[in-house]
Amino acid sequence: MKIGIGSDNNGFEFKEVIKKFIEETTDHEIIDYGCYNDDAIDYPDVAFEVAQAISEEKLERGILICGTGIGVAIAANKYPGIRAALAHDTYSAERAQLSNNAQIITMGAQIIGYEVGKKVVEAYLNFTWAEGSARKVNKITEKEKEFVGKTFEEVTGNACI
């Protein structure tokens, strides 16, 4: 499996640990989308790169890390067809894949430790969507299609805050 991994500076060390773990324990190919040191960067930039690579089928899955995991999840989910799920425990990682066919998991380097992060990634990579929740995932996809290309104002009638 080809997996993209990325983080902002808050998740840099965590990303390096997770990347090494995957390289040492699996046969998966890892592509590192940055960041490459602890210099400050904006998390959406990395999240957008990984999400785009998945939408272009250059990657099968992604792992994104920031301080909380929330920001990279929000950013990645802006790409049509992308489902990025925050996972800070093995059950969430399992369900991200089995129930939601999430192409990306996100984690918070300031929320969980390295060993938990390894277990979360291991759980996520060891499951494959069996389409058991296809009806639900399809509902999400259909709703998304209604809004692609529209602005917040067009959808809600309100100016963006």
Image (cartoon, rainbow, N blue to C red):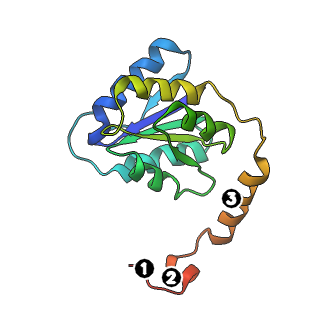
- Asked whether disc 1 touches disc 2, contact meaning CB atoms under 8 Å apart, the reply is yes
In the image, taking residue 139 as reference, residue 92 lies left or right, namely left
Residue designated by label 2: 153
Quadrant holding the C terminus: bottom left
Q: Nearer the viewer, mark 2 or mark 3?
A: 3
**Tag 2: amino acid:** Glu
Picture quadrant where residue 138 is located: bottom right
**Tag 1: amino acid:** Cys
Residue designated by label 1: 160
User: For the residue labelled by badge 2, is the local secondary structure a helix, a strand or a loop?
Assistant: helix
User: For the residue labelled by badge 3, is the local secondary structure a helix, a strand or a loop?
Assistant: helix
Q: If you read the primary sequence from the N terminus, does the residue marked by circle 2 or circle 3 appear first?
A: 3
User: For the residue labelled by badge 1, is the local secondary structure a helix, a strand or a loop?
Assistant: loop
Assess disc 3: are there few (<14), some (14-19) or many (≥20) residues with their C-alpha within 10 Å of its C-alpha.
some
In the image, taking residue 113 as reference, residue 154 lies left or right, namely right
Quadrant holding the N terminus: top right
